[in-house]
Image (cartoon, rainbow, N blue to C red):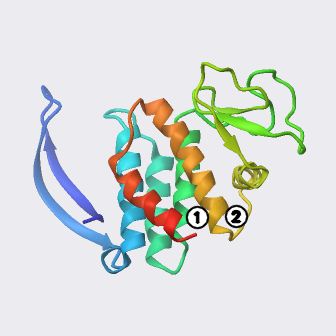
Amino acid sequence: MLSAGEVLWIPRPESRLATLTSWTPRKTWPALRTSYPRWLAAMYVAELCGAVMREQDPHPEIYHRLVDMLDAIDAPADPMTEVLRTQWVVLCAMGHRLELDEDVMTHTPLRPSQVVSFLPAKGGFTTAPPDHEIAFGVRRSTLDALRILNRGEPLPPAREILGRASGLLHEAIRSILGFDLRSWEGYYAWAVRST
């Protein structure tokens, strides 16, 4: 279902529509058709990218990350790691990079010994979540994984941590979009079962 190709069209100057004249497939990712976990990851990321991109508002970094992610999971790369990286690129491209080092409520540095909560609507973490906001308790290892991701370093292989970090990023994305992505439930159910 996911494939890359070359499209030729004839634009209509007075319309946003165009006449499609040809579609030439250039690249496919066979592992998506033979591995259910890889297919679930690809469907989620494709839906995510489609949900955040609008007409006349290109985000080449999202497109390139999508292609890189599909290339990676077509090889032996871990789908959970690649989904997490893609979620991070999407958030950053949308201008919603999470605040990982400062409390979003008190604007003081987060200390390693503190228990923190994630506030999706605020785009970061706090030690004192307000009663009227949706907040998720966060383990230190999950926050550390997000910091590693932000620095562009190799992620830890602990699938449980990757799953929790991906869940937090999805909550941030859902808060921004104002709706849930249908493919998330299937992907996340697999990710939780695989830990």
Contact between labelled residues 2 and 1, with CB atoms less than 8 Å apart: yes
Q: Is residue 142 left or right of residue 59?
A: right
Locate residue 23, reporting x and y percent: 17, 61
Residue 100's disc is none
- Image: 179 above or below 142: above
Asked which secondary structure carries label 2, the reply is loop
* Residue at the spot 54% in from the left edge and 65% down from the top edge: 80
Callout 2 crowding tier (Cα within 10 Å): few <14, some 14–19, many ≥20: some
Type of amino acid at the residue the image marks with label 1: Thr
Quadrant for the N terminus in the image: bottom left
* Lower position in the chain sequence, tag 1 or tag 2: 1
Tell me what residue is drawn at x 46 percent, y 71 percent: 71
Q: Position of residue 152 (x, y in %)?
A: 71, 57
Side of 120 where 43 appears, left or right: left
Residue 155's mark? Answer: 2
Q: Estimate how packed mark 1 is, as few (under 14), some (14 to 19) or many (20 or more) residues with alpha carbons within 10 Å.
A: many
Residue 190 vertical placement versus 65 (above, below): below
Residue 93 showing in the rendered view? no
Q: Amino acid at mark 2?
A: Leu
Q: Which residue is at 40% across, 47% downward? A: 49
Residue 170 at x, y percent in the picture:
51, 45
Q: Position of residue 145 (x, y in %)?
A: 72, 55
Q: Is residue 69 above or below residue 151?
A: below
- What is the count of numbered marks? 2
Q: What is the spatial separation of the Cα atoms under label 1 and label 2, in whole angstroms? A: 7 Å
Q: Considering depth in this image, is 112 or 149 the residue closer to the camera?
A: 112
Give the residue pinned by disc 1: 81
Q: Quadrant of the C terminus?
A: bottom right
